[in-house]
Image (cartoon, rainbow, N blue to C red):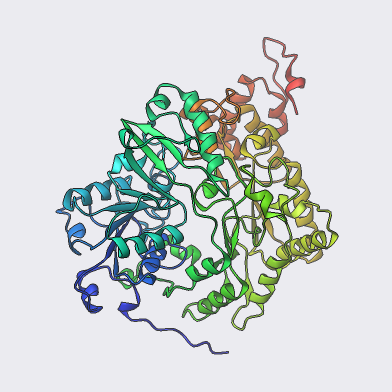
Amino acid sequence: MKVEEITYKLTDWLPTTKKEVELRGWDELDVILFSGDAYIDHPSFGTGVVGRLIEAEGLRVAIVPQPNWRDDLRDFKKLGKPRYFFGVTAGCMDSMVNKYTANKRLRSEDAYTPDGRHDMRPDYPTIVYTQILKKLFPDVPVVIGGIEASLRRLTHYDYWEDRVRPSILLDSGADLLVYGMGEKPIADLCKHFIAKGTLPHHLPQTVYIKKKSAMEPTAEDCVLFSHEECLADKKKQASNFRHIEEESNKYVARRILQAVDHKYVVVNPPYPPLTEAELDRSFSLPYTRLPHPKYKGKRIPAYDMIKFSINLHRGCFGGCAFCTISAHQGKFIVSRSKESILEEVRKVIQMPDFKGYLSDLGGPSANMYKMKGHNEDICKKCKRPSCIHPAVCPNLNTDHRPLLDIYRAVDALPGIKKSFIGSGVRYDLLLHKTKDETVNKGIATYTQELIAHHVSGRLKVAPEHTSDEVLFYMRKPSFKQFYEFKRIFDRVNAEKNLKQQIIPYFISSHPGCTTEKMAELAVITKDLDFRLEQVQDFTPTPMTVATEAWYTGYHPYTLEPIYSAKTAQEKLAQRMFFFWYKPEEKPGIINTLRKIKREDLISQLYGIRKVPLSQPHSNVKKKKK
């Protein structure tokens, strides 16, 4: 079947230059967006989405992607002064996570930049761009948003500078911060500017600065320890985080106030989650789904990854201790309608280089589509950070049949040869047994079809560790569930005569993890015949419970001390156990196991008999798990 391809002209993208503005017949702009990422007009890239949202409100908007901040600042001046405001974002990722590894080394490439170049954005672009704009145009409001701003909205630990920093509003000088996903706040922000021509401070899901003398906290407010108190006492910083996370996970949250330098940082409560229709509208905006033509002939790694993928839902109720998804997107799942999803798939089919294979039908977690509470009134009163840890909430509807229906409908479309699931799968949801046998049968059918028809050779899952103690700190299920899921995976592969792999992700140096627990992980994964590839050293990022525990030394929910590997030597001592099979790691591993008195693990890893030391170690057997 021949599929009609769509052709585009330059004005189908939002303008990025003076010439492109003039092509539209505009002599003035209402809003100008500055982004640390390349401009990709696609629903997976925040700047493109925000631009289209502003356009949908009837405003004239332009985007300046990756402006040069080191020359005469012509990129910041070229479009002049907007009528309403400048918008600034670092891009789709925190700029420091995007640029540096856990060892603070430069990553191999910048995924959101043409040809992966590293020199197209500064560190902390939100701060750098905003300070430039406030200097050039002091009378124009600057509104910041995106991951970097969202997760730095209050006092936070910055791993790359190894210091506690105040709200990014203070460091940047911005006038307003929009946190989380932007559809509702951006639309209302634009409506307010159209009606009043001023910057609002009453909008939900925004953050602003107010002089302490000009406001008084109310009994309903959540008042945190001040920034100065957090600098002086790590336990107060840890204590703050519990309140921040709980308010972020509530359906109806309180306003948060934090004092800093005779001012208050004021965090207005978030909007309720989007409705299905509202999310569908966001995905139905007139995206070309392509990078701007200025990048013709250049490779943008992040775009290549999602080019033929479809996002089915938003949010994640997993609440993993090291993850920022719920802090930004929220824990309540918002799903697109079947019609919206199929319409986007049809657009992908029309792309000139599409060969019939969708790389992903997924979301933050692949298999949470349409999941919510049976009784949503219970959810509205809940402040649990996770709906599935330490156990699956009995009120959670884990029915996988709606997702299975999406897979089958997509695969039935002319032009689709195969759809794969590239997002991580929560196998604890697949193993959960409910009181409803029809739901259980649906989960079993989903699992069977997922493994048999939607794995492109390798299925991603994230056990993260093998120690139940560490997994509890991570808010992840017991490793026993990984064994159970692997048995199902292997059985289906055998029945279907497939040779697929299961690819587990693991993390070292997470709070609560010791060198001994990493050594035990090495033995367990060896017994499973894994030579690990998908591994990482824990990277402390703003606004996660794990980061606060790592920095402060206290668990935010108990305020009990917790161990974390912090020095480069301690972190490397843990990381090397992932690679026990590499000859160059063997001497270091053997030496370390002797130091921690776990010679029993040497024989399990390398078949080397325990070498007697000068002192007997009667506690070896007690320590062995």
Q: Residue at x 26, y 66 (%)?
A: 30
**As displayed, is residue 240 above or below residue 623?**
below
**As displayed, is residue 557 above or below residue 193?**
above
Query: In the rendering, at what x and y percent does residue 414 appear?
Result: 61, 84
Q: Residue at x 60, y 76 (%)?
A: 339
The reply, left or right, for residue 88 in relation to residue 188 is left
Split into 4 quadrants, where in the image is the C terminus? Answer: top right
Q: Nearer the viewer, residue 15 or 383?
A: 383
**As displayed, is residue 578 above or below residue 92?**
above
Q: Nearer the viewer, residue 289 or 484?
A: 289
Res. 165 image quadrant: top left
- Tell me how many marks there are: 0
Query: In the rendering, at what x and y percent does residue 145 appear?
Result: 38, 52
Q: Nearer the viewer, residue 311 or 355?
A: 311
Split into 4 quadrants, where in the image is the N terminus? Answer: bottom right
- Is residue 177 among what the camera can see? yes
Res. 513 image quadrant: top right
Query: In the rendering, at what x and y percent does residue 124 appear?
Result: 33, 45
Q: Nearer the viewer, residue 147 or 598?
A: 147
The reply, left or right, for residue 450 in relation to residue 115 is right
- Is residue 571 among what the camera can see? no
Q: Residue at x 21, y 70 (%)?
A: 28
